[in-house]
Amino acid sequence: MQTALAHNLCLAARPTAARVVGGRRVPALRSASTTRCQAATVLGRAAADDVVTIRFDSKGKPVVSVGGTSASAGTDEKAELAELANQFNIWNSALQTGDPEQVANLYADDGILLPTVSNQLRPDHAGKVDYFTSFLQLKPFGTIDDSFVRFLTPERDVGSNSGIYTFALVKEGKPVKVQARYSFIYRKIDGVWKITEHHSSAMPEPVAEPLDEVRGLFDIWNNALQTGDPEQVANLYADDGLLLPTVSNKIRPCHESKVDYFTSFLQLKPYGTIDERNVRFLNPAKTLAANSGIYTFNIVKEGKPASVQARYSFIYRKIGGAWKIVEHHSSAMPELPAAAPAAAAPAAAAKEPVGELPPCLLLFQRELVTAGSAPTEKRKKVFGLF
């Protein structure tokens, strides 16, 4: 079967009549060298019951395929997806030139631009140049935050890159960042990827600054404390998260050990308030963050309200799109609070017998007794204490 089919395909080298395919008039096959090469490759790896077909692309070029896989699909798909994803970098680099023509040239002749900050559709080259002339004055630099890259046709000649990007801009002389959603639809034309659809839109919901999101993680943890459920608190930690608690010598590396600690701690009805904090990202991808500082807990101990101040370090990692605590170290304040100055004693109190001297004065008294017969240097040292 395959030999006969190969023979029939080779006959395509002779001119044939024009045909209508998919409602389009396709020119006659006057040169089938490409078709014969594709057929030989395809038939060499086709099973006996595979369907071998010829389709014609938008320019009437024949493409041989087996079982729906085109002969041109030999290139590794991951590499092709990487090439498709790289089109954003090409577009972003064109922005850096400051030349609206270079940016507009990346769009297909029939490409549509629906820009972020303009109500006008930009269906032609001049409209795109007009938009980018204004946009490039903001000195935009784009960074992709989240993306989905995929092919939209089996032949992998149409693809899309959709997601969320952030632009660093200079507005009124000040640096600002703007996040938006995007859809790039690309079509390969004469071997070159062109943008055939570009839709960019502002985020429809209020967007928190990334560090604000990290700051809010303490509130989530504190609210979990208010439930009185140790499981809810322990669920905020990563599977490999470590807890070094304030009032326990034990490190808590697993879920059960954290539940054990919070079962006791929650009996104090703790409510935390941050006194001082430092929040920052620990990696460029902003998937690892730290919140370190000082917090005070209002607790109920032995039926009486009390407050305890401590130092804390929360290290968070984004796992599956959710922030989890991977390290939580809490420790008591290492220095005792400064003593309040003593109130002036009433005059009558001076006549009362003096009680036991404080330790520091007892030490001075002993030194003083022996200082009389001590060398001059010793006496200077003793009396120089005050």
Image (tube, helix red, strand yellow):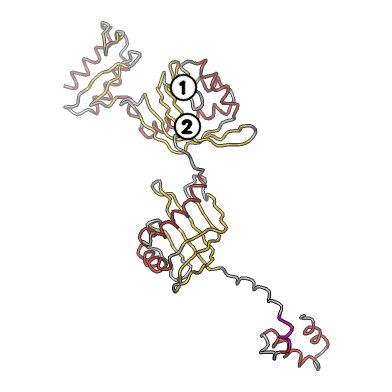
Give the residues in magenta. Answer: 345-350
Q: Which residue is mark 1?
A: 113
Asked whether 348 falls inside the magenta stretch, the response is yes
Q: Residues within 10 Å of mark 2 (few under 14, many from 20)?
A: some
Q: Main secondary structure of the magenta part?
A: helix
* Residue 311: in magenta span: no
What residue sits 48% from the left and 22% below the top?
119
Query: Is 199 situated left or right of 37 in this image?
Result: right
Give the labeled residue for mark 2.
202
Q: Is residue 279 above or below residue 156?
A: below
**For residue 96, above or below residue 226:** above
Query: For this rendering, which residue is in front, 159 or 367?
Result: 367
What amino acid is found at the position of numbered circle 2 in the picture?
A: Ala
Is 213 or 338 nearer to us in this picture?
338
Q: Position of residue 224 (x, y in %)?
A: 40, 57
Quadrant where the N terminus is found in the figure: top left
